[in-house]
Image (cartoon, rainbow, N blue to C red):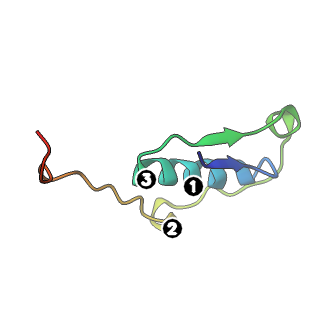
Amino acid sequence: MPVISASTPADCFDAVYEAARISVQHMTPVMFLSDGYIANGAEPWKFPQSADLPEIKVSFKQGLDEGEE
């Protein structure tokens, strides 16, 4: 199971986005670790533009493989 953790309050967004990307692309649970220091911390941080975020590619199964019902 992938485990992702943030090192600073500003790093939380990027770490959670990466955890979501891994979870969706690989269809696996991902554990995100944080702690009270990060949760209660604060620092300046600029929210990224959605166009600057890496794409999360989602692929769906198109049909049954041989031997599947």
Q: CA distance from mark 1 to mark 2?
A: 14 Å
| Image quarter (top left, top right, bottom left or bottom right) of the N terminus | top right
Q: Earlier in the sequence, mark 1 or mark 2?
A: 1
Q: Position of residue 13 (x, y in %)?
A: 64, 50
* Amino acid residing under circle 1: Glu
Name the foreground residue: 6 vs 46: 6
Disc 2 target residue: 52
Q: Is label 1 in a helix, a strand or a loop?
A: helix
The residue mark sitting in front, 1 or 3, is 3
| 10 Å crowding of disc 2: few (<14), some (14-19), many (20+) | few
Give the residue drawn at x 67%, y 49%.
4
Give the residue drawn at x 47%, y 59%.
50
The residue mark sitting in front, 2 or 3, is 3
Name the foreground residue: 39 vs 47: 39
* Amino acid residing under circle 3: His
Q: Is label 2 in a helix, a strand or a loop?
A: helix
Name the foreground residue: 30 vs 15: 30
Left or right placement of residue 14 versus residue 29 in this view: right
The residue mark sitting in front, 1 or 2, is 1
Q: CA distance from mark 2 to mark 3?
A: 22 Å
Q: Earlier in the sequence, mark 1 or mark 3?
A: 1
Total numbered labels:
3
Left or right placement of residue 2 versus residue 58 in this view: right
| 10 Å crowding of disc 1: few (<14), some (14-19), many (20+) | some
Q: Quadrant of residue 41?
A: top right
Q: Position of residue 59 (x, y in %)?
A: 28, 56
Disc 3 target residue: 26
Q: Position of residue 25 (x, y in %)?
A: 41, 55
Disc 1 target residue: 18
* Amino acid residing under circle 2: Asp
